[in-house]
Image (cartoon, helix red, strand yellow):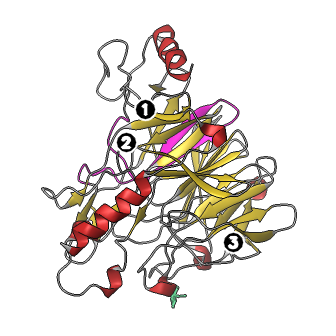
Amino acid sequence: MKFANIIVTFLAASASTVRAEEHQNLGWGVLGVRLPEPLSDLSATLDPATNLIYIAGGCDSPNGNEFAGEYFVCATISDDLYVFNPQDWSFGPRETLPRQRYRHCAEIVNNQLWLLGGRDADDALITEVDVYDIAEKSWSVFTLPDDYLTSDQACFTDKSSSFLYVAGGYNATYGTRDATFRIDTSTASANLVVEEMAPLIEARGDVFAASDGEFAYLGGGFTDANGFCAPLETAEKYEFATNTWTNLPPLINERGEIVMVEANGDVFALGGERQIQDICDVTGNTDPGELTVGTEVVEVLTDSGWKVIESFDDHKFRFAAVNVDGLIYAFGGQDAWDDGCQCFKTTDEIHLLGDGVTSSPTVAPADGGLSGPTFSLWAVSAVLGVVAAMVF
Ligand SMILES: *[C@@H]1O[C@H](CO)[C@@H](O)[C@H](O)[C@H]1NC(C)=O
């Protein structure tokens, strides 16, 4: 009963949202088109040259994270690469990654999709860095020095140089890292050369970063420093020009796995998960569903700190999101605890967040939905009509 009260309190607090002045019309929609399969802990990366989104890896078990006595495990990991076109909401032909991978990070630099870090189905860190040449549609495999193997770390770029930056994450035994390093992708060879940069102010794993080209932003996450008993509320930003991290105002809703997205000059902190308050002080049996809860909160960074501006219509975490011209696409993730399967199920939903997007209706596919086993291509004119109706 105690837990039920805590959950209710937490949800009530997060539901009382105050919209920032500048985003009065922000809202959610759920696309009528879905991912080709339910996925969480995936990466989604926008190629600025083509405006296509590359969706790689992830947990592809429909039962997502299942409780295994002490912790949660995902039974099957994806080696799929999907290309999503936000112009017509179609998925291009599927390609295969060199290996299964989840809880990695991804960036497009040098016209190449870089997949770095993460874990395999045995929870082992992945040493190979897989690099997809977008023009050639071919993979190269590089290796990271052992000291830089991580999962649940943040990747980011300055959007103009050939450097790929990596910060935070966990080592093989879930020690939390504060290291920041970068790789010059234009001179990469089989054994990658790593350059150490200024470390994070606070070691943290389960982090994502957003970049506006001048600064990268990240926040929240989890740490072994408190025994993973509570999420971090601190946030920080990295200045590329000076190689320095500085503190941002603390988050309003501290949590891990916050998806950070920069859109039209604003930094959004989406979703995430946290433990029930004071989880480590609780004695006796704890229901697995109370060990972690997804949150539905969206915060935006303003001159006077973070502001809660919107909520998903449901909890959602372990998803990936990108900004395309001011609209944020959020792919997959996991839903709230399901008692029946004792699991957090993966979802194939794609959410859309943006000013003027209506929050409640599901946008139906123009023509009966997915046509093939894996892919669909809608009539472009019909889809663009739907987008226009949602946005204006
Ligand atoms: C991971 O990090 C922890 C804490 O810093 C450390 O004690 C441990 O030895 C590290 N494990 C590995 C495999 O590097």
Q: Do the residues under discs 2 and 1 have CB atoms within 8 angstroms?
A: yes
> What mark, if any, has residue 313 been given in the picture?
2
Label 1 belongs to which residue? 359
Q: Measure the alpha-carbon separation of dots 2 and 3.
A: 35 Å
- Amino acid at pointer 1: Ser
CA neighbours of label 2 inside 10 A, class few (<14), some (14 to 19), many (20+): some
Quarter the N terminus occupies = bottom left
Q: Earlier in the sequence, mark 2 or mark 1?
A: 2
Q: Main secondary structure of the magenta part?
A: loop
The vertical placement of 71 against 355, above or below, is below
Q: Amino acid at mark 3?
A: Thr
Q: SS class of the residue under badge 1?
A: loop
Region in magenta: 35-63
| Above or below, 240 relative to 376 | below
Tell me where residue 48 appears, x and y as whole percent: 69, 36
The answer to if 258 sits in the magenta stretch is no
Residues at circles 3 and 1 in contact by the CB criterion of under 8 Å: no
Q: Does the rendering let one see residue 189?
A: no
- Helix, strand or loop status at disc 3: strand
- Can you tell me whether the CB of the residue at mark 1 lies under 8 Å from the nearest atom of ligand 1? no
Viewer-side residue, 366 vs 271 = 271
Question: Can you identify the residue that label 3 sits on?
Answer: 180
Q: Is mark 3 within 8 Å of ligand 1?
A: no
Using a 10 Å C-alpha cutoff, classify the residue at mark 1 as few (fewer than 14 neighbours), some (14 to 19) or many (20 or more): some
Q: Position of residue 115 (x, y in %)?
A: 56, 54
Q: Image point 35% across, 54% down: which residue?
A: 59
Q: From mark 2 to mark 1, how far is it between C-alphas?
A: 8 Å
Looking at the image, is mark 2 or mark 3 earlier in the sequence? Answer: 3
